[in-house]
Amino acid sequence: MNKATIKLFIAWLEQAERGQIAEKRREFEETLADVRSREAKADLRLGLRLIDEELLARMDLDSLPSQREQA
C-alpha cells in the first residue's frame, strides 16, 4: 500500500462504526485466502493490523472512566 492509500484507510478507520470495521475485516480475511501475490497479501495483512490497532485503541478508550465519573 502506498502512503496515500494508508492515510485514507486510517482516516476511514477513525470515522467508521464498529460494524463497518468488522465487515471490512471479514472482507480482508476472505480476500487474503484467495490472493496469490506476496505484495497483495502484505497489503491485506497491513490492513488487518491497522484494524486490530484501531479496535484495541477503542477498547482502551471505552475502559477509561468518563469525565462525569471522575467529578
Image (tube, rainbow, N blue to C red):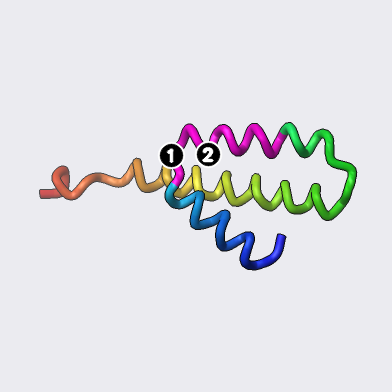
Name the residue located 64 percent from the left edge and 32 percent from the top edge: 26
Query: Could you tell whether 25 is left or right of 32 in the image?
Result: left
Circle 1 residue: 17
Give the position of the N terminus as an image quadrant.
bottom right
Q: Regarding mark 1 in the picture, which secondary structure is present there?
A: loop
Q: Is 58 displayed left or right of 1 in the figure?
A: left
Instruction: Give the percent coordinates (x, y) of residue 57.
Output: 45, 49
| 26 with respect to 59 (left or right) | right
Q: At x 66% / y 35%, what residue is drawn?
A: 27
Residue in the image at 78% along x and 52% along y: 42
| Labels 2 and 1 touching (C-beta < 8 A) | yes
Q: CA distance from mark 2 to mark 1?
A: 6 Å
Q: Residue 21, image x and y in percent?
A: 53, 39
Q: Quadrant of residue 39?
A: bottom right
Which of the numbered marks, if any, corresponds to residue 3?
A: none
User: Considering the numbered disc 2 on the image, is that residue within a helix, a strand or a loop?
Assistant: helix
- The amino acid type of the residue labelled 1 equals Glu
Specify start and end residues of the magenta stretch as a single range: 16-29
Is 31 magenta? The answer is no
- What is the x, y in percent for residue 66? 22, 46
Q: Tag 2: residue type?
A: Ile
| Secondary structure predominantly adopted by residues drawn in magenta | helix
Most extreme residue toward the bottom is 3
Estimate how packed mark 2 is, as few (under 14), some (14 to 19) or many (20 or more) residues with alpha carbons within 10 Å.
Answer: some
Residue behind mark 2: 21
Please give left or right for residue 68 compared with residue 26 in the image.
left
Q: In this rendered view, identify the residue nearer to me: 1 or 67.
A: 1
Binning the other alpha carbons within 10 Å of mark 1 as few (below 14), some (14 to 19) or many (20 upward) gives: few
Residue 21 versus residue 50: which sits nearer the camera?
Answer: 21
Q: Is residue 28 magenta?
A: yes
